[in-house]
Amino acid sequence: MKINPISILINSSLKSDKKIYFISGNEKTLMEKIKSKIIERFDKDENVQIKTLDSIIDFVDETGLFHENNIFLVNSIKGINKETLNNIKETKYIFIFLQENSQKIKKIKNMFDSDKDSYLVDCYELDKSSKIKILNEFLSSNELKISQEVYWMLIDKLDSRYIFLENSLLKILDLGEKDITLNNVKKILIVDDYGKERIFFNLLKENHEIVQLYRNKVITNSDANDIYYYSKFFCELIIDSNDESEYSKNIPIYLFRERNYLIDIYRKYNSRKKKVLIKLLSTTEKILRKQSGLSLAASLRFLLNIKRITTS
């Protein structure tokens, strides 16, 4: 059955009463947040262990050998059908599937949607209604007061991508004020996001130039997280493209000025470098899970590692 991702984010009393979760959509940061929230809820009640599978085909039920409170993260839709779905229902484990939207998963999503023992969670960019729910929960849980003017300014200006919206709210919390003024919010929301992206577009410069640009644009740990997700987007664009033609088509239209630069970057990559880049992203994700974010130093090191891989 389908469940709204916002309900998972803001409803702390929502029961984790399903064993199977299929997280899909086109908003990667919200997908990752939902995955973390689901794991967090099960981990509150039991000491769970996380195991990763490339596909459900790799799953072997070895009850008694495995820790009984396992959560299996499944990274592809390969092997999913009604038979395998029924088989994993019989186990004691929790299964979380993550798969971005595409035409080939439409039937599989319908299968999870119609299954009463599973949750289908579709994650898209946040609309106004979703922002209102998230902001209301944030203000209530942190006992913050704001005027109507500030409230609707936030609804209008907060990013539609979850991780960037969350980072803005964390910056508000960092103010340490219970009454949030318009001036304070303006300082937080007037963020030169485009300037942050510019750091990735300068990766071919000398290290000292990159470091200087980074210090000018990245001030807080929330900024460091922003940089990571910006850079991760461009890295995954390289990794997921099979050739230059496909890569060129996948470059967002709004980056038309940077198209030639991005294509030059892609031409420096082969299968070996892509594997190294995948490993870097995986290592950084582990840091994120353990520390709930990147430090300023870790984010800069991540950028310089991308530069090293690209130019090697």
Image (cartoon, rainbow, N blue to C red):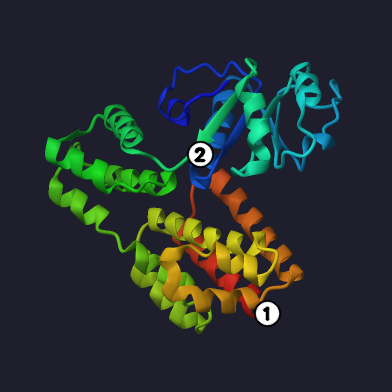
Identify the amino acid type marked 1: Ser
Q: Which mark is residue 312?
A: 1
For the point 57% across and 35% down, which residue is it? Answer: 35
The residue closer to the viewer here, 68 or 99, is: 99
Quadrant of the rendered image containing residue 246: bottom right
Residue 222 seen in the current view: yes
- Name, please, the residue furthest toward the bottom: 206
Query: The N terminus lies in which quarter of the figure?
Result: top right
Residue 82, above or below 50: above
Identify the amino acid type marked 2: Lys
Q: Residues within 10 Å of mark 2 (few under 14, many from 20)?
A: some
Residue 3, above or below 129: above
Q: Residues within 10 Å of mark 1 (few under 14, many from 20)?
A: few
The residue closer to the viewer here, 81 or 56, is: 81
Position of 103 compared to 183: left or right?
right
Q: In x, y percent, where is residue 134?
A: 34, 33
**Residue at the spot of label 2:** 33
Q: In x, y percent, where is residue 180?
A: 17, 41
Q: In x, y percent, where is residue 233?
A: 53, 58
Query: The C terminus lies in which quarter of the figure?
Result: bottom right
Residue contact between numbered discs 2 and 1, judged by CB atoms under 8 Å: no
Quadrant of the rendered image containing residue 308: bottom right
What element does badge 1 sit on?
A: loop
Q: Real-space Cα distance between discs 2 and 1?
A: 33 Å
